Amino acid sequence: MATSPPFPTCPPSPGNGVLRHPHWWQRRWVRYGALSSLLALSGLVILALVRRQTGTEGFLVGLGLAVLPVPWLIAAFRWLDRVEPGPWRNLVFSFAWGACAAALIAIVANSFATKWIATSTADPASADTLGATVIAPIVEESAKAAAVLLVFLFRRRDFTGIVDGVVIAGVTATGFAFTENILYLGTAFGTDQLTGDRGIASVTAATFFVRIVMSPFAHPLFTVLTGIGFGIAALSAERQHVRRVLVPVCGLLLAMGMHAFWNGSSTFGEYGFFAVYGAFMVPAFALLTWLAIWTRQRELRTVRAELPAYVLAGWLGPAEPLALGSMRARRMARDYARHHHGRPAAREVARYEACATSLAFLRHRGRQGKAGADFVVRERELLDELWRRRSLARPALEYASRAAMPVPVYWGPAPHGYPAMPYPGYPAYNPYRS
């Protein structure tokens, strides 16, 4: 059995080696239990409020229609996060927060603000318009941004860049839009029941077309701006305190402004909605989509650039940096492991790929002086994860590198007693060559 290369020296533990036990409120099960209880309670309350407003039949119709875009949106954000996939628990929390807590905050706050405006102004008829264009964007975007902030603060290891911010914000907004669509579609169905309208001329059909067909991406698009702000803050050095605060705030303000502009499009005339949709929303959506995909490609380039240092140290095989820097090669490696060893092996290879990617990003931040104080400890954890899975992952990645990238192959000596392996696209490493 091959021995692992030496670990980096760990920094001394704080407190002169004295073990300090956390207080009861700092224990993980207490935090998880409190958060789960909060979300469950919010879900029950929002369920009761929506059902009371739409009726049981309207609620079921709204639920069936509102769920249609959810799998597509979640799959899109999950695809974007394939380079360094975050844990599912973060996505589940984000969706649950958006669908339950943020939706409850928005319904209660928007209703209260609209009633207050209607009773305190000389023109009660303008209360709905003012509430939709001013109050709703502030309340809703702030409620959704809370989920991004919580993940940023308490899951900092999983929140390392712009893509993480986009994914967490987008999934949160998807959950929020899901609950809001149930309310709107259920209410529209109730209106049709009272008026007797059916078919494509019904209020339900019009609401479905506008909210589900034309603009299922509206809420994710707004909140993604907040996520980008937090993602830039995550890329900033810890000493840049002003930037780490101001950039997320600017992202939130942009999200509020875009949301207000979208909600106010109905007041711009008969074709105001379609004009804003075509001239503003679609280009903004295309621009942010391009930015997200470009950021993902930049992450792959970072993987290819940072991992060769661990090849020379003996932690990775010579073919792995290029294979890990290609989504096609990654998929082929998982397929290879699944074909020869079954699904558990494929999951192990996927975990190996994720840890290697995290290691590359960690080293990249460290070289830029943006890594946290736990850099050495985190590096050691990731290297240990890789070393435990090397027997399954290394042959799969070696195969994928040969199959996916037919480039010139150079043979060179392998460090730390590994068998000689091809390193596609790179000359043979010779430590004695000047």
Image (cartoon, rainbow, N blue to C red):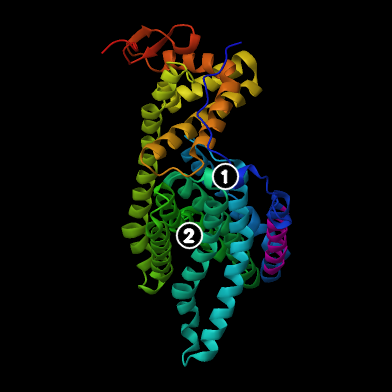
Q: Position of residue 115 (x, y in %)?
A: 57, 83
Does residue 40 belong to the magenta stretch?
A: yes
Structural crowding at the residue carrying mark 1, measured as other residues with C-alpha within 10 Å and reported as few (<14), some (14–19) or many (≥20): few
Label 2 crowding class (10 Å Cα cut-off): few <14, some 14-19, many 20+? few
Q: Say above or below: 187 vs 370.
A: below
Q: Residue at x 60, y 25 (%)?
A: 348
Q: Nearer the viewer, residue 192 or 302?
A: 302
SS under mark 1: helix
Classify 205 as above or below 123: above
Kindly give the residue lying farthest to the front in the view shown: 16
- Please state if 269 lies on the left or on the right of 130 as rendered: left
Q: Residue at x 59, y 55 (%)?
A: 66
Which residue bears the numbered disc 1?
Answer: 71
Q: Is residue 72 magenta?
A: no
Rendered location of residue 145, percent (x, y)? 51, 60
- Residue beneath disc 2: 210
Give the residue at x 57% y 59%: 176
Q: Is residue 110 visible?
A: yes
**Magenta stretch in the rendered image:** 33-49
C-beta proximity under 8 Å, tags 2 and 1 = no
In three-dimensional space, the C-alpha distance between marks 2 and 1, rounded to whole angstroms, equals 18 Å
Q: Who comes first in sequence, dot 2 or dot 1?
A: 1
Which quadrant of the figure contains the C terminus?
Answer: top left
- Say if residue 197 shows up in the picture: no
Kindly identify the amino acid type of the residue bearing the numbered disc 1. Pro
Counting the numbered discs, the total is 2
What label sits on residue 329 in the rendered view?
none
Q: Is the N terminus in the top left, top right, bottom left or bottom right quadrant?
A: top right
Q: Quadrant of residue 431?
A: top left
Most extreme residue toward the bottom is 122
What is the three-letter code of the residue carrying label 2? Val
